[in-house]
Image (tube, rainbow, N blue to C red):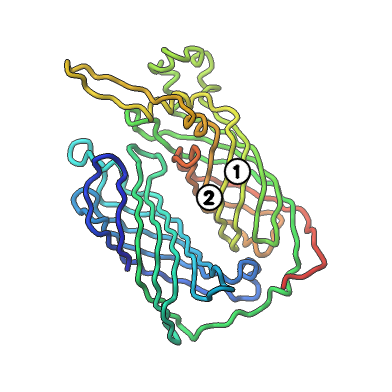
């Protein structure tokens, strides 16, 4: 059970009482000898969690049902055996959304289905043979990945009291890590994706973002994947705004109309890191936008506001092109999950994956996409020393 506080997402956000959540989790230990990634990560637990959350205001914010795959690590094991970190990323259904007339001050959630993220520290306060009683402190997030605006996101801080039930007495790890040699492989990979986003609250219908990326790097011990590459994207919203003679194009950038396709594109370089857990990959990328010319208009539309003056005239104020704009224009990020057709534990030379990711300008959601890709591994480079 979680008790916590829903944080204010915007000015005049609806008042909330105590947030209440109930989560039911099912997890497994990973002590099997053939799970190299588990040995490399000191035998984390993995599983799936189903939760129900009441945000503390049933009329204006409502409730959510969430589903999270998770991984749980023991941390500071030398200092204490009782502290664990659990991280989950998944999806949620939220039953109450923003409405310009009926619910105008909840600008956090605008769609039924949303991305969800959960991070909790757990401390085991009392242990019996098959039951651990735990205190937890954590953070929860819900947002739609820029597929409809407004999308300020629901953020919560929570305290939990829970019990963990083991189906058997506490198992002891099978120390097989010594059988795994330290090794690395060079890889090359490509992916194509199709995503969706909206341009602004004025242009709030979903349109596609098409992308392609290539990368190369190293896979260390069949568990850690690091690399870098190049991405290219085409934004349908950008293209349509230019083709339809949008006001800001006419006023500021009329030359965009000479090549709407080119000015609706984005390309850059990225560094990628991925945790390989058998068939599953947890991926985080950090990128540098070399070319994204339309983002100037994107920013002005999204960071601006409008109001009605005393004489009834609507005044539009554009977002300021300040230092923060320069950072957001330059830095991209990407986070999500991948499923590989063949387990990475077996180090297959050829592998195919599908992925679901949220892409961002720095930390602000840009678009959500689905992708399919291919990875090719070259031969092992193996060291003579063993692990442990």
Q: Is residue 117 above or below residue 204?
A: below
Nearer-the-camera pick, 78 or 387 = 78
Horizontal side, residue 302 vs residue 325: left or right: left
State which quadrant residue 90 falls in: bottom left
- The furthest residue to the right: 384
Q: Residue at image x 34%, y 54%?
A: 156
Q: Which residue is mark 2?
A: 355
Q: Which residue is mark 1?
A: 191
- Which quadrant is the C terminus positioned in? bottom right
In percent of width and height, residue 316 lies at 30, 21
Specify which label sits upstream in the sequence, 1 or 2. 1
- Check disc 2: other Cα within 10 Å, few if <14, some if 14-19, many if 20+: many
- The furthest residue to the front: 79
- Check disc 1: other Cα within 10 Å, few if <14, some if 14-19, many if 20+: some
- Image disc number at residue 344: none
Q: Residue at image x 33%, y 31%?
A: 201
Q: Is residue 183 above or below residue 31?
A: above
Q: Residue at image x 53%, y 42%?
A: 333
- Which quadrant is the N terminus positioned in? bottom left
Q: Are marks 1 and 2 in contact (CB under 8 Å)?
A: yes
Horizontal side, residue 123 vs residue 176: left or right: left
Nearer-the-camera pick, 321 or 46 = 321
- Label 1: element kind: strand
In percent of width and height, residue 223 lies at 65, 61
In percent of width and height, residue 3 lies at 30, 64
Horizontal side, residue 333 vs residue 11: left or right: right
């Amino acid at each position: 059970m979680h008790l916590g506080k829903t944080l204010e997402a915007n000015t005049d956000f609806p008042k909330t009482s105590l947030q209440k959540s109930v989560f039911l989790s099912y997890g497994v230990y990973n002590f099997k000898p053939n799970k190299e990634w588990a040995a490399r990560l000191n035998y984390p637990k993995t599983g799936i969690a189903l939760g129900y959350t009441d945000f503390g205001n049933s009329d204006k914010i409502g409730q959510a049902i969430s589903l999270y795959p998770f991984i749980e690590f023991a941390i500071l094991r030398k200092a204490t055996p009782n502290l664990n970190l659990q991280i989950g990323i998944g999806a949620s259904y939220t039953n109450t959304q923003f409405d310009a007339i009926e619910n105008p001050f909840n600008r956090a959630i605008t769609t039924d289905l949303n991305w969800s993220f959960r991070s909790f520290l757990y401390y085991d306060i009392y242990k019996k043979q098959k039951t651990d009683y735990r205190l937890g402190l954590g953070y929860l997030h819900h947002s739609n990945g820029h597929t409809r605006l407004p999308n300020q996101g629901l953020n919560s801080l929570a305290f939990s009291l829970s019990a963990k039930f083991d189906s058997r007495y506490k198992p002891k790890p099978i120390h097989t890590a010594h059988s795994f040699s330290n090794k690395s492989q060079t890889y090359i990979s490509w992916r194509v994706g199709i995503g969706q986003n909206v341009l602004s609250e004025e242009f709030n219908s979903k349109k596609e973002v098409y992308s392609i990326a290539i990368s190369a790097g190293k896979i260390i011990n069949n568990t850690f994947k690091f690399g870098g590459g190049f991405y290219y994207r085409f934004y349908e919203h950008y293209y349509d705004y230019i083709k339809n003679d949008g006001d800001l194009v006419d006023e500021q950038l009329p030359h965009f109309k000479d090549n709407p396709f080119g000015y609706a594109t984005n390309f850059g370089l990225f560094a990628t890191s991925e945790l390989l857990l058998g068939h599953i990959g947890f991926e985080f990328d950090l990128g540098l936008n070399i070319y994204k010319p339309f983002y100037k208009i994107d920013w002005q539309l999204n960071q601006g506001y409008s109001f009605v003056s005393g004489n009834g005239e609507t005044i539009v104020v554009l977002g300021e092109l300040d230092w923060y704009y320069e950072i957001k224009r330059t830095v991209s990020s990407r986070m999500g999950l991948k499923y590989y057709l063949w387990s990475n534990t077996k180090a297959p030379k050829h592998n195919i994956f599908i992925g679901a990711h949220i892409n961002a300008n720095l930390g602000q959601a840009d678009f959500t996409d689905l992708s399919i890709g291919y990875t090719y591994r070259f031969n092992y480079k193996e060291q003579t020393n063993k692990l442990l």
